[in-house]
Amino acid sequence: MLLAKVVGNLVSTKKNPDVLGKKLLFVQPLDAFLNPFGDEMLAVDGGIGAGIDDIVVVVTEGRGARTVAKAESPIAPIELAIAGIVDSIQVGDKYTQIR
């Protein structure tokens, strides 16, 4: 799993049947102190209702991501799924309120 910030939406008129009706979001990976790193990635919203600027938890394993995204097929083309929206983060004695 990783921490990320939702930075965009993807709209597609044609999709694989396994992702029909699912929201696709671009996410920017973050470290524990909310510093961005790496490239943006595309994730399926697992029914959480995340939106732009939300800090989210992303499942990065195929099977786990498919479970979070409630995919009906065990071979659905889902590698990343948003599992939750972060309210706060505490690392050591540093506490950050997000929402």
Image: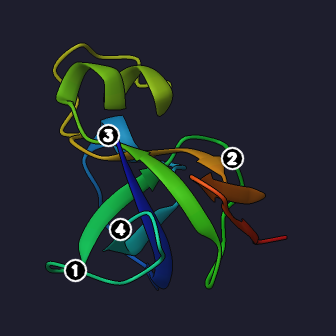
Mark 3–mark 1 Cα distance, whole angstroms, equals: 32 Å
Local secondary structure at mark 4:
loop
Q: Which residue is identified by label 3? A: 17
Residue 16's spot in the image, x, y percent? 25, 47
Task: Examine the rendered structure and indicate whether residue 37 appears above or below residue 72.
Answer: below
Q: Nearer the viewer, mark 2 or mark 3?
A: 2
Local secondary structure at mark 1:
loop
Q: Earlier in the sequence, mark 2 or mark 4?
A: 4
Local secondary structure at mark 3:
helix
Q: Nearer the viewer, mark 2 or mark 4?
A: 4
- Residues at circles 1 and 4 in contact by the CB criterion of under 8 Å: yes
Q: Earlier in the sequence, mark 3 or mark 1?
A: 3
Residue 85's spot in the image, x, y percent? 68, 54
The C terminus sits in image quarter: bottom right
Mark 1–mark 4 Cα distance, whole angstroms, equals: 7 Å
Q: Which residue is identified by label 4? A: 31
Local secondary structure at mark 2:
loop
